Image (cartoon, grey):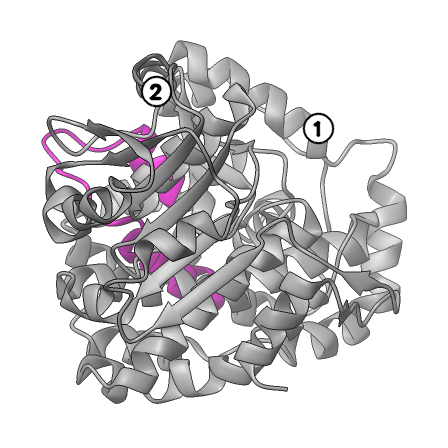
């Protein structure tokens, strides 16, 4: 089955879950990926059944590339309220509330943008009990079709449950015309699949955490060409661009059918979150996908290293509040300790877990190795597009990045290879420096 057929089956609710045999569906009613959507905007939105006043939300950049066009197209048929931020916004709770206030007299949201605009509209519309649709302006991330939104709350970057877009519209002409760096970021976000799946499956085997294979099965049709043939994407090939669009669409749907961001966000995203939450002084930050790509390469190296060794021997998790306060600050240090406590290896269960690892390590290694990609392939894919592969490429010093690697596990309650390495004493300074 090709990726387009998979998307259509998920929209129709006829995709068969390989684990349960049940049919899987998504709340999104339509996904349109076309060489151009020019002239189709009104029919696409009307086809969703939207009525009344529409808040068309953009920022100065996305308004220029598509927002103005969407507003002009919709105005003859709908009441349109233009909500254009004065500058590119941040996806934080204060901005969510400002958006809700600005759009309080509207009936639905039309997001015109990429990650931040999409997440703001997704979360704000969910809080308001209204529907939303999105016109994508860049292939920079996989959140267009997910039901979770990355929102910073009191300085802590969180994945909050929201709801799915009624319609997702991708104009490949607009997406190809976006800054090249945005496509690099989208590829970088896609590179998280192998390390995220390995982390999630480890947690499932060790703790019985819920796990689904569907979010990864739906990506198979396009992933090999996407990772192994980056030259086509770098050259602006139309099919390669569509391949990335489908991959990001299906990655978002993977999170939706799993009802969690776990299929696409594990340790590699925690490392990126640390960069966002505790950036070094004067560091301007980088695109989300770029940060995730560098972290995914590091996590892939760590996973390969540990899977090539004997079964790790766990010790009870150490939650050092002083160290967490030093790494995250007083308030975040407390919330990180609370998150870590939920997944901590406890003294009363450590012997059972170690016996499980000892008995099953060979099978675990074989199973996880089968779904991994070599770090060299991920590095090459980013390098061909001119993207970052090392922390230095992000403008980060090695000492800072090492701190991110050793601190990120404490941000949330997902048990990953960072936890396994740290709880078994394998996360030595020498190993960290090599990642």
Quick one: which residue is furthest to the front in this view? Answer: 76
Q: On the rendered structure, is 403 left or right of 398?
A: right
Q: Quadrant of the C terminus?
A: bottom left
* Disc sitting over residue 103 in the figure: 2
With respect to residue 386, does 352 lie above or below?
A: above
The residue positioned 28% from the left and 44% from the top of the image is 74
At a point 46% along the width and 42% down the height, the residue shown is 270
Considering depth in this image, is 283 or 243 the residue closer to the camera? 243
Q: Main secondary structure of the magenta part?
A: helix
Assess whether residue 314 is covered by the magenta stretch. Answer: no
Of callouts 2 and 1, the N-terminal one: 2
Residue at figure coordinates x 53%, y 78% from the top left: 4
Q: Is residue 418 above or below residue 404?
A: below
421 lies left or right of 368: left
Residue 338 position by quadrant: top right
Residue 299 shown in magenta = yes
Q: Nearer the viewer, residue 195 or 134?
A: 134
In this view, the residue in front, 161 or 86, is 86
Any mark on residue 342, and which? 1
Q: CA distance from mark 2 to mark 1?
A: 38 Å
Q: Residue at left 13%, top 53%?
A: 65
Q: Residues within 10 Å of mark 2 (few under 14, many from 20)?
A: many
Which quarter of the rendering shows the N terminus? bottom right
Place of residue 230 in the rendered image (x, y in percent of width and height, measured from the top left): 29, 83
Q: Which mark is residue 66?
A: none
Q: Mark 2 and mark 1 in contact? Answer it, CB < 8 Å.
A: no
Asked whether 190 or 17 is in front, the reply is 17
Examine the rendered structure and indicate whether residue 94 appears above or below residue 37. Answer: above
């Amino acid at each position: 089955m090709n990726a387009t057929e998979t998307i259509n089956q998920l929209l129709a609710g006829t995709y068969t879950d390989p684990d349960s045999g049940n049919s899987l569906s998504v709340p999104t009613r339509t996904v349109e990926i076309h060489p151009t959507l020019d002239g189709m905007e009104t029919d696409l939105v009307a086809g969703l059944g939207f009525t009344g006043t529409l808040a068309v939300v953009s920022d100065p950049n996305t308004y220029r590339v598509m927002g103005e066009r969407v507003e002009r197209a919709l105005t003859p048929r709908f009441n349109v309220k233009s909500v254009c931020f004065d500058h590119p916004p941040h996806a934080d709770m204060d901005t969510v509330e400002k958006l809700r206030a600005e759009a309080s007299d509207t009936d639905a949201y039309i997001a015109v943008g990429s990650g931040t605009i999409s997440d703001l509209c997704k979360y704000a519309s969910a809080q308001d009990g209204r529907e939303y649709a999105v016109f994508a302006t860049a292939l920079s991330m996989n959140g267009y079709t997910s039901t979770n939104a990355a929102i910073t709350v009191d300085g802590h970057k969180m994945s909050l449950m929201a709801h799915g877009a009624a319609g997702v519209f991708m104009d490949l002409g607009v997406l190809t015309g976006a800054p090249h760096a945005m496509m690099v970021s989208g590829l970088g976000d896609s590179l998280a699949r192998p390390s995220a799946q390995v982390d999630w499956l480890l947690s499932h085997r060790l703790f019985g955490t819920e796990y689904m294979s569907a979010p990864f099965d739906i990506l198979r049709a396009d992933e090999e060409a996407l990772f192994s043939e980056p030259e086509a994407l770098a050259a602006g090939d139309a099919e390669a661009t569509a391949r990335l669009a489908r991959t990001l669409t299906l990655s978002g749907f993977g999170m939706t059918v799993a009802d969690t961001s776990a299929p696409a966000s594990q340790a590699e995203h925690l490392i990126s979150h640390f960069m966002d939450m505790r950036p070094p002084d004067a560091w301007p930050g980088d695109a989300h996908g770029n940060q995730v790509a560098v972290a995914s390469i590091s996590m892939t190296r760590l996973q390969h290293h540990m899977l090539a060794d004997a079964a790790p021997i766990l010790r009870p998790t150490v939650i050092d509040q002083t160290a967490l306060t030093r790494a995250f600050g007083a308030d975040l240090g407390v919330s990180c300790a609370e998150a870590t406590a939920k997944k901590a290896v406890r003294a009363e269960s450590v012997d059972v877990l170690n016996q499980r690892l000892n008995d099953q390590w060979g099978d675990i290694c074989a199973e996880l190795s089968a779904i991994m990609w070599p770090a060299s392939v991920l590095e090459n894919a980013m390098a061909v597009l001119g993207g970052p592969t090392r922390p230095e490429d992000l403008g980060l010093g090695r000492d800072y990045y090492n701190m991110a690697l050793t601190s990120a596990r404490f941000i949330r309650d997902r048990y990953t290879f960072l936890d396994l390495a740290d709880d078994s004493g394998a996360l030595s300074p020498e190993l960290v420096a090599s990642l």
